[in-house]
Image (cartoon, rainbow, N blue to C red):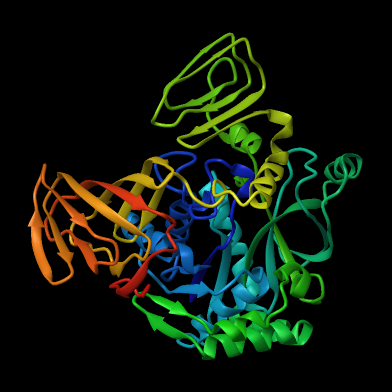
Amino acid sequence: MLHPVVLSGGSGSRLWPLSRQNQPKQFLALIGDRSLYQETVIRASKLPGAQAPVTVCSGDHRFMVGEQLQEVGVANGGILLEPMARNTAPAIALAALHVIADDADASLLVMPADHLIEDETAFRNAVAAATGLADAGWLVTFGITPDYAETGYGYILRGEALSDDGFKVERFVEKPDLATAEGYVAQGNYAWNSGMFLFKARSYLDELAKHAPAIFAAAKASYEASESDLDFIRVGKDEFAASPNDSIDYAVMERTDRAAVVPVSCGWSDIGSWSSLWSVAQRDEDDNRHDGDVISIDTKGSLVRASDRRMIATIGVEDLVIIDTPDATLVARKDRVQDVKAIVDRLKAAGRQEHLFHRKVYRPWGSYDSIDMGERFQVKRIVVKPGAALSLQKHHKRAEHWIVVSGVAEVTCDDKVFDLHENESTYIPLGSVHRLRNRGTEPVELIEVQSGSYLGEDDIVRLEDVYGRS
């Protein structure tokens, strides 16, 4: 049976400030109403004979994965939580071990969560062509027929034909300079390396054990030490940490003699930068892409994305990228957006938070938005989903005031449990054991005012938590 495997471990730093570590690009609706992750799992679920997709992701994103699957009605074939990033080779090994536990002859279709495919029929045909090769023991990668000389992708040189649509891989090539890339495109027998694969789970594990035994051993030990946590599978942390940090290309595909490639032209993009998003988006007569409340005069070839907080106006500019969020705004020339990562690196070095979190942070129980803060105080807008509850907790360094704006909140404060209605408020003293719960059918919205000597999120002592965070 065909088991889609969706790798969702990337941080998408080149799409900052919209993409953050806590909410990377695969979970954002960059094109259309659904996220890239949702589009990936929907596309996979439409393939003939496809089973429920397996997702490999960070523990920080587990609730986002579960919620986005539910939103689009796609079944969960397993959500494997990586304790830390170790690249694609061990991540795929975890998925292979998980799938063959119930299906010894399983085939894996491995896809990154953050890629765009516009021509699903061409993709479906390529999967069908790759299936026969995988059944014969080949490890198949999908090579994208290049539209132009791109220096940001690796390339695959195809060798002898193995079928009508598949070829043996002659060699993999690292990202080339422009002149070399132009030569590859002119030759016609090179393809972009898409990072998508199809093979038997057992074939992959056998080749991994042969060419990268340390990765195989660490993944196997880690999966064997796994534990169930709600709808998630937590693999062994120490065992997984022992794995080398290698990609499937380096660990297996460049070393095996069983590598094959199926070329495909399917409107593929990895949405690796703001300029690549502009290139695949629908644009107006002036070659602009506007999202949100934007007014432009004499503006050409630009990508402007406004937040829901304010309007953006442009006059007499060309080839710009302007991305606005409530706490950060990026303005860059379109030909310099690959350097956005340097901004993220500088934020990290300065110990700032803008690369980690948006001002609005999503939690399994709802969300909070830090609408104002200063020395010794912070104001948050909190929304609690119906039936959800925050953890039973206390703080060592802050007190809190809660004011209900809408809905009915059940409040626990030490030995008291009571309802708080619209326009009512309560005080949570420093050190008090407290919890906020929504037992109703509508969201609860409230304003929280924190005051104290320290207001960081790490001043939370969780005593009890339905989401397994205590």
Q: Nearer the viewer, residue 401 or 115?
A: 401
Q: Residue at the spot x=57%, y=53% of the render?
A: 123
Q: Residue at the spot x=52%, y=41% of the render?
A: 18
294, above or below 307, in the image? above
Q: Quadrant of residue 393?
A: bottom left
97, above or below 142, in the image? below
In this rendering, position of residue 186 left or right of residue 197: right
How far across and how far down the image is residue 4, in percent? Answer: 50, 68
How far across and how far down the image is residue 297, in percent? Answer: 54, 9
- Residue extending farthest to the front is 453
Split into 4 quadrants, where in the image is the C terminus? bottom left
Q: Residue at the spot x=51%, y=90% of the render?
A: 225
Let me know if residue 265 appears in the view. Answer: no
Q: Nearer the viewer, residue 304 or 1?
A: 304
Q: Nearer the viewer, residue 440 or 156?
A: 440
In this rendering, position of residue 95 left or right of residue 78: right
259, above or below 153, in the image? below
In this rendering, position of residue 226 left or right of residue 446: right
How far across and how far down the image is residue 221, in percent? Answer: 59, 90
